Image (cartoon, grey):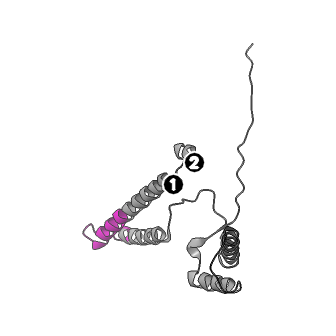
Amino acid sequence: MPITTTIEISPGRQATTPKPNFKATNWPYFQKELTKKLANYGPLNEIRSETEFYNRLSTLTAAIVDTTKATVQKTNPLPFTKCWWSKELAQKHTEVCRLGRNSCTKRSNPDEPAHKAYKAARNTYRTMIKTVKKTHWEDFLQSVNDNTIWTAHR
């Protein structure tokens, strides 16, 4: 008699934590708030020892972290988001969809300029996606080190 083993395992989703959305940050406001925080620490004198250097470094780091927490909005990433996606691609996608609908409404006339405009926009959009993906992949490979090599392997 054969032995049958049944294992019921469902992979759980990893809990996502809200992360700062630096793309949507109001940088002039961030800079103004950081300047206010740094002004509270008083005048800067010449650093004369290693201990003083590390104290100033921790003060600066704390100011940046506090300002980031206060001014940068948090976002919960969706589990299937594309890390290479950008606002420019979203705008181009909207434009291509609009031109596609316009081309579809005029499909009875093959000589309509709307068809050429749609085809040109669609090809530009496709090229933009390929370029962004390639750039993102190359940047990722540049950042790979001994500890993250197996992440690149996946």
In this figure, which residue is indicated by the disc labeled 2?
148
In this figure, which residue is indicated by the disc labeled 1?
143
Determine the residue located farthest toward the front in the rendered image: 48
Q: Nearer the viewer, residue 53 or 129?
A: 53
In the image, residue 29 lies at what x, y percent?
61, 85
Instruction: Say which residue appears at 48% left-offset and 51% top-offset.
Output: 141
In the image, residue 96 lies at what x, y percent?
41, 68
Highlighted magenta segment, given as a residue range: 104-124
Q: Nearer the viewer, residue 115 or 85?
A: 85
Crowd class of label 1 (few under 14; some 14 to 19; many from 20; radius 10 Å): few
In the image, residue 36 lies at what x, y percent?
67, 86
- Quarter containing the C terminus: top right
Residue 65 magenta-drawn? no
Instruction: Say which residue appears at 34% left-offset and 62% top-offset.
Output: 123
Crowd class of label 2 (few under 14; some 14 to 19; many from 20; radius 10 Å): few
Task: Tell me if residue 108 comes above or below residue 37 in the rendering.
Answer: above
Relative side of 117 to 80, left or right: left
- Quarter containing the N terminus: top right
| Residue 126 in sight | yes
User: What secondary structure is the stretch in magenta mostly built from?
Assistant: helix
Q: Which mark is residue 28?
A: none
Task: Tell me if residue 95 comes above or below residue 45 in the rendering.
Answer: above
CB contact under 8 Å: marks 1 and 2: yes
Task: Tell me if residue 43 comes above or below residue 25 in the rendering.
Answer: below
